[in-house]
Amino acid sequence: MEMISSKDNIRVKTAKKLYKKKYRTTSYLIEGVHLYEEACKAGAEFVQIFVTEKFANIENARLVSSEVMKFLSDTETPQGIIAEIKLPTLEMTSETLQRLLILENVQDPGNVGTMIRTADAAGFDGVILTAGSADIYSPKVLRTMQGSHFHLPIFLENDIQALYARLKTQKTTVIATTLSAESIDYRTIAKPEKLALVMGNEGSGISAETAKSADILAHINMIGQAESLNVAVAAGIMIFSLTD
Amino acid sequence: MEMISSKDNIRVKTAKKLYKKKYRTTSYLIEGVHLYEEACKAGAEFVQIFVTEKFANIENARLVSSEVMKFLSDTETPQGIIAEIKLPTLEMTSETLQRLLILENVQDPGNVGTMIRTADAAGFDGVILTAGSADIYSPKVLRTMQGSHFHLPIFLENDIQALYARLKTQKTTVIATTLSAESIDYRTIAKPEKLALVMGNEGSGISAETAKSADILAHINMIGQAESLNVAVAAGIMIFSLTD
């Protein structure tokens, strides 16, 4: 196997561009052994795999020098494996989805990744992100999700009104979290059979449209002095309370 | 008020060093309006306050140029206020503490800050960090705590065996979270009157010492495919389930 030792190699240069969203039209990069193994388990379609000597035994992998790996990597200490994977094409068939997490304009990559991981752990059927939420194929979200995007479908939905209309016809209870006084304590909610839990933006919360369309507005009672909970922590409390 | 416009100003240079732990012997820096207001509310002891024109009305503040503020700041877009505050001297009087969160070797600053904020929201009485946990006076933890360190006492404890011995004599139920099969489902735990919840390291979990000393080992049941929950999410679920 020939080793790529120049950062100017066209494959290397082209692959590195995939960290930028505008270049991510058909594929994206994952980094590290854990995500690579998750991708294999999930039967993800590999475009190419860059490895250092350590992983030279991987079939059809492209061997690169440590310097090139460092150049390609988004981390301080690269593990030595980066794979380019085809973006999945998912069609939303929410008819079959019993438990959905909707992230409305959640902007912090760590929060988005952590909530998808939590929904995965709780056995949710899917996640819907509205426009304005962090890009799930960015390195930070991918790291935080720890492979959960291989376990459950994640949809992008720009038309939130159409989404709520569809959920209504499917008799899915939409529960939106808020700090508003007009909401109910989450502990008083009877566990719905089909539910969509909406978490809003870190600063401004859920949109007026969501507040109007939701079947239930709920909050987490806080007896302490903190003004709010981190959105991913709040999501974890709600998800496990509502489905557990 | 005279404006400091040089980064070489001795006050500025000395203050900036406080981002490094080794220089943080008697004071630390907080940044931004929210933390400044929380510090005022809490009656924190200010050493000095650096401000740009925008906050020039603050009494006894030191006016600095935008360039100096940028130099002093730990953020990309400084709000224009940084205060040096005396480190508190706290003596642990755990006799009076009914609800404690113990962070054992939790290394990620975001996780540490988020868990302290959650404990604050839930009305906990205090947090204990063991050696090896992230430094709570680092900028990242301070940002994530959002002022919770002004609301509840945070103790450092290097002798974990002595800590557990003390909690035992005070009849505090120590609940440690684990992924181990020998632990019980957290939903089956009767809410204890006095409790100390232990969250362990992100990678390796709780120590053998904690596993041996805890009254209850508990886990969160996951029906999905994710291998684990983020430690701060798990803490949120446990905290609200055990005390709510």
Image (spheres, coloured by chain):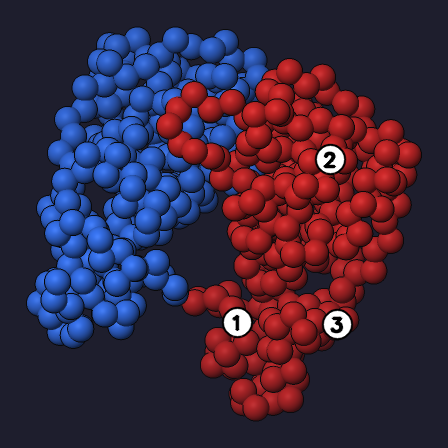
Chain colours: A red, B blue
Task: Residue at 33%, 35% (x, y): give it.
Answer: B148
Assess disc 2: are there few (<14), some (14-19) or many (≥20) residues with their C-alpha within 10 Å of its C-alpha: few
Rendered residue at 56%/13% (across/down) = B188
* Residue placed furthest toward the left: B10
Q: Nearest to the eye among marks 1 and 2: give it.
A: 2
Q: Position of residue B122 (x, y in %)?
A: 43, 24
Where is A110 relative to B13, above or below?
Answer: above
Residues under numbered marks 2 and 3 in contact, where contact means CB atoms less than 8 Å apart = no
Residue A185 in sight here:
yes
Q: Earlier in the sequence, mark 2 or mark 3?
A: 3
From the image, state whether disc 3 or disc 1 is nearer to you: 3
Q: Nearer the viewer, residue A242 or A81?
A: A242
Q: Amino acid at mark 3?
A: Thr
Of B33 and B29, which appears nearest the observer?
B33
Give the CA distance from mark 2 to mark 3.
Answer: 34 Å
User: Which chain hosts label 2?
Assistant: A
**Chain of the residue that carries numbered disc 1 in the rendered image:** A
Drawn side of residue A108 relative to residue A77, left or right = right
Q: Which residue is mark 1?
A: A73
Locate residue A65 relative to residue A173 in the image: left or right: left
Tell me which amino acid carries mark 1: Ser
Which residue is denoted by mark 3 in the rendering? A25
Decide: few, some or many residues near mark 1? Use Cα within 10 Å; few <14, some 14-19, many ≥20: many
Residue that badge 2 annotates = A212
* Residue closer to the observer: B110 or A122: B110
Q: Secondary structure at mark 2?
A: helix
The chain containing the residue under callout 3 comes to A
A1 w.r.t. B61: above or below: below
**Residue A240, visible in the rendered structure:** no
Q: Are marks 3 and 1 on the same chain?
A: yes
Inter-mark Cα distance, 1 to 2? 44 Å
At numbered mark 1, what does the secondary structure look like: helix, strand or loop? Answer: loop
